[in-house]
Amino acid sequence: MNSSWLIISGIGWEPEIRGLLTVALASTVLVGSVWLLLVTNTGIRLGSLVLLAGFFAWFTIMAGVWWLFGIGYSGDAPTWVFIDSYADEAGSEPSGIEDAYLADVDLLPDPNCSAVRIFPPSKTGWEFTAPGDGCTPRAIALVMIYPGPDRDAVIEEFATLDEAQIRESAEISNSLRQPGDPRKLNPSELERSIQDQITRQERAIDQLSLSTLAAGSPAVIEWAQDQGFFNLEGGWKLLSSAEAGEANAAADAVITESGVFPTTAGAATPAYALVDTYQRGGKPPPQSDSIWDRAINKITNSALLGHPTNYAVVQARPVKPMVQVPGEPPPLAEIDRNGQTLSIVLERNLGDRRLVPGLVTIGSGLIFVALCINLHVRELRIRSRDEEYAPSA
């Protein structure tokens, strides 16, 4: 008795009881009223058959729409599934991702060849040298040497640091603090804080990823590939950060669960950062965004009997632990370029989103056909009896 009462008390009015009552009342009023009209005019047996035939006809149409668009009572959605992972230590050593044996992952260039700081070149003295064979170029290096007609816009978006704005913001914020506020800085401390913020912003620009660059300026990536600075073999292609959202989320879950990048107690930044994402396989995309190319691509992909396996590789790098300083903005995550790069290999599971509505459509259609045949046979039987007992002329 007590256990039953506990179970009942755990059921809330919203949404359980109210939802059940709403569905029951709607079914009774809507379906029941139609059934009542039918049986009062045609009889219980014929009226019920007509009602059921109409119901399953409607359900066939509705489930067909679910089947077509993959909505409603659907199965599992496509997801990225973890397959394996490979670690690359700093430097261009012949091990790490080169040891991969799945999906030609070993054909990807080494992501850890360069650990030097590039930005700003006026302070670092950096000069461009072509990436070594089998090495991934640094995104900020491509930005600095890009000669395209939109070079100024690319530099402004990815490689511009407004030191005056940082200084003005810090001075205004410090001036608004009262003299007794422990966060108020003297001139030397304020200058040191401003220089620290400038340095962190410079490091944030220096650690620009190729996927981020591909999202903001794909022309730079295309130019680098044409020049031979960024070579991808085996059908691999770089995904922009906008295209890699779902794969990055799956990789995030894998890394967090595995604990491969331990979190430092009291750190204000995450333990790792996702950088570049690559994809290979799957059905080919359209050649362009034109309606004609998309229509042809849809037809040709639908004609394929199977689904080519789709792989993605998400690369993550460790982040230096940073402590939040009271009164200052949150610190920017700084990638540790002397740490290893972890490549997460994912495989696309297509799921069965349309299987359930497809089965419902077929099942409802078969029941509808069976009811129609029953009604037809009944009509023929009644017509035969009418002709049998009809008075002769």
Image: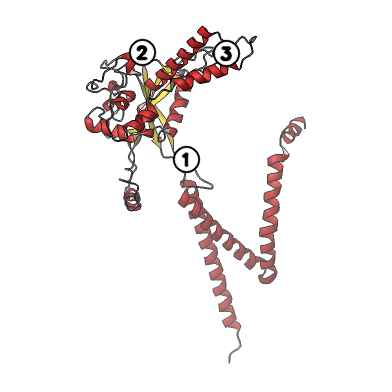
- Residue at 69 percent across and 56 percent down: it is 28
- Residue at 46 percent across and 46 percent down: it is 355
Q: Please report whichever mark, 3 or 2, sits nearer to the chain's N-terminal start.
A: 3
- Front position in the image: 281 or 208: 208
- Residue at 54 percent across and 70 percent down: it is 377
Which quarter of the figure is the N terminus placed in? Answer: top right
Q: What residue does disc 1 label? A: 77
Compared to residue 11, the image places residue 102 above or below, namely: above
Q: Using the image, tell me which numbered label, if any, was put on residue 326.
A: 3
Residue 100, by quadrant, is top left
Disc 3 on helix, strand or loop? loop
Residue 277 visible: no
Foreground label between 3 and 2: 3
Disc 2 on helix, strand or loop? loop
Q: What residue does disc 2 label? A: 338
* Mark 1 vs mark 2, CA separation in Å: 39 Å
Q: Please report whichever mark, 1 or 3, sits nearer to the chain's N-terminal start.
A: 1
Residue 164 visible: yes
Three-letter amino acid code at the position of disc 3 = Pro
| Residue 44 percent location from the top left of the image | 67, 66
* Most distant residue in the right direction: 1
Q: Using the image, tell me which numbered label, if any, was put on residue 162.
A: none
Three-letter amino acid code at the position of disc 1 = Ala
- Residue at 69 percent across and 46 percent down: it is 20
Foreground label between 1 and 3: 3
